[in-house]
Amino acid sequence: MLTGASALAATMMFAGQALAQDLLGQPTPGAIDLQPAASSLKRDAIWFHDIILMPIITVITLFVLGLLIWVVVRYNKKSNPVPAKFSHNTTIEIVWTVVPVIILMVIAIFSFRLLFAYNDMPKPYMTVKATGYQWYWGYEYPDQKISEIISIGLSEADSKAKGVPYRLAADNAMVVPVNQVVRVQVTGADVIHAFALPAFGLKTDAIPGRLNETWFKAEKPGVYYGQCSELCGVDHAFMPIEIKVVSQAEFDAWVQSKTAPPAVAAPVADAAAPAAAVATPASAPATTPAAAPAAPAV
Ligand SMILES: [Cu+2]
């Protein structure tokens, strides 16, 4: 019991410490708790984990540990030389059947409530279709009439140069406005991928031939990172998800830059981006760490 309690205390201290300096939208080195929430769904998920699951599992673990220690100390050969002969006890058998059922029902009530919250999408402001490819993502904005923007993970050198986290940052982020409900339609073009972003509590399979749906409402502007979360081949670890949450005005300007005709002089850099992006899939394998540094030199 003492070992268990001290381990728990150490864990809680560690968690409390990590919590104080957790980064928003990306993992924190040395941290052990869930990433801080940036959407209501994630907040609900954290509540379910911290208030329902963790206390239950802690109590059960300590209870079982106590039982084990009790049996070892009280009923070993030395302290209990003549063991009892009975092998059934109706009362205890009913208790250890009914109590777990009640525990599971309590968990189920909160679990289903969270599940329904995920399915109960408010009226969306916009839709983004996220398609998983081997090994990058494509983001299409049907409402804004923006055709698919290819998003490829940055090489280690590029990440370092830009000061962004390697294997989390991408060349083109999914850009969305803050405080708006964004519906994400998720599918896969070749194999099964998974669209996951911890800060928004998202994890949806990207399955070829099927259109899955999830949603989020980002509460704070910023850059949020996730990763493909279904083993999808050799470069599975190199297809990050980057969502850039901006103000409504910035989003409108971004949409303008993506939809403006390429002939206009001012947004040349932006207008050129989709063309460059579309060209990249062919050279996508070049984003692997081994090939990436070599590519610019050639
Ligand atoms: Cu994948």
Image: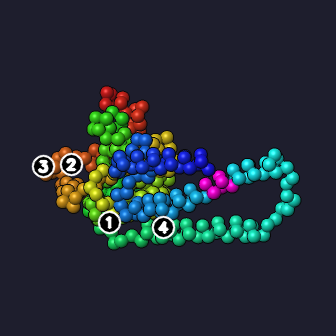
Q: Secondary structure at mark 2?
A: helix
Residue 145 in sight from this viewpoint: no
Between 280 and 20, which is closer to the camera in this rendering?
Answer: 20
Residue at the spot of label 1: 181
Q: Of the residues under marks 4 and 1, which one precedes in the sequence?
A: 4
Q: Which mark is residue 266?
A: 3
In magenta, the rendered stretch is 62-67
Crowd band around label 3 with a 10 angstrom C-alpha radius: few (<14), some (14–19), many (20+):
few
| Whether residue 63 is situated above or below residue 153 in the rendered picture | below
Q: Hey, which quadrant is residue 168 in on the image?
A: top left
Crowd band around label 2 with a 10 angstrom C-alpha radius: few (<14), some (14–19), many (20+):
some
Disc 3 residue type?
Ala
Q: Mostly what secondary structure, the magenta segment?
A: helix
Q: Is residue 146 magenta?
A: no
Which is closer to the viewer, label 3 or label 4? 4
Q: Of the residues under marks 3 and 4, which one precedes in the sequence?
A: 4
Q: Is residue 65 magenta?
A: yes
